[in-house]
Amino acid sequence: MARTVNPIQDRARRAALEKAAYLAIYERGYAGVTLADIAGYAGVSKGTLAYHFGSRAGLLAAVMRRFTRTITVATRRALRQASTPTAKLTAYVENQFYGVENTRRFYTVSLDFLAAATRDPELMAVQRDFQRETLTLDLELARLAGEAGAEERARLLRALVEGLSVRFLADPTPDLGAYRAECLRGLRAVLGWEATPA
């Protein structure tokens, strides 16, 4: 008799496996992590991983899709809940730098993944999807200063965040509040806001 799969339980299992893989990548590095490592973190067999994801590459692509989607969904929700332009900027910044360990983990894995994606078309497709998602969010912020020049401002906003994220990773004792404040000042400068808008 064929095994019946409960779709809700299956999604929950996949999510737990993706989270375990994410932690394994963070601790061991993308290039160094094996299916055996990930299975160990998840407390499952390598066969379970193969059943759900097909291969190491399939699992790692799923991990990045999940965690980049988590970031973009959380940021989009925060922007929609903010009622003023200043509140939107603050919400955006807080979602880019959201706790020292979480921020360090996310940007470490993201940079490691990007390096691997330069040599793997499937992973690069995931990276490009993430870039499209973040561009949508960056454009939303850039348009707070008007439609004219919004695309250029959006690219500058992204460059600012990515530059600060690299500095954050290199900082042995990052001060989360200082990075948030610097990011907020930079975003305001890109938008051309000298005083707080209403």
Image (cartoon, helix red, strand yellow):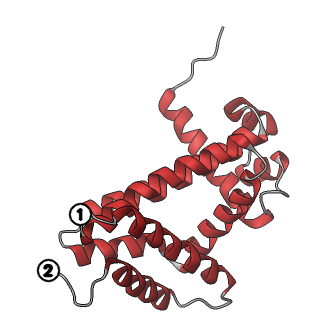
Q: Nearer the viewer, residue 116 or 13?
A: 116
Residue plotted at (44% across, 84% down):
180
Residue plotted at (73% across, 48% down):
43
Residue plotted at (76% across, 45% down):
120
Is residue 104 shown above or below 135?
A: below
**Res 30 quadrant in image:** bottom right
Say which element carries label 1: helix
Say which element carries label 2: loop
Q: Nearer the viewer, residue 135 or 15?
A: 135
Judged left or right of residue 64, residue 74 is: left
In the picture of the structure, the residue carrying the numbered disc 2 is 198
Q: Is residue 147 visible?
A: yes
Judged left or right of residue 140, residue 179 is: right
**Residue 113: x %, y % from top left:** 70, 57
Is residue 114 shown above or below 1?
A: below
Amino acid type indicated by mark 1:
Gln
The reply to whether callout 1 and callout 2 are in contact (CB within 8 Å) is: no
**Residue 68: x %, y % from top left:** 53, 55
Judged left or right of residue 12, residue 191 is: left
**Residue 16: x %, y % from top left:** 60, 47
Q: Which mark is residue 27?
A: none
Circle 1: is it few (<14), some (14-19), or many (20+) Cα within 10 Å? few
Residue plotted at (68% across, 60% down):
23
Q: Nearer the viewer, residue 15 or 67?
A: 67
Amino acid type indicated by mark 2:
Ala
Q: Which mark is residue 81?
A: 1
Instruction: Tell which tag, 1 or 2, sits nearer the viewer.
Output: 2
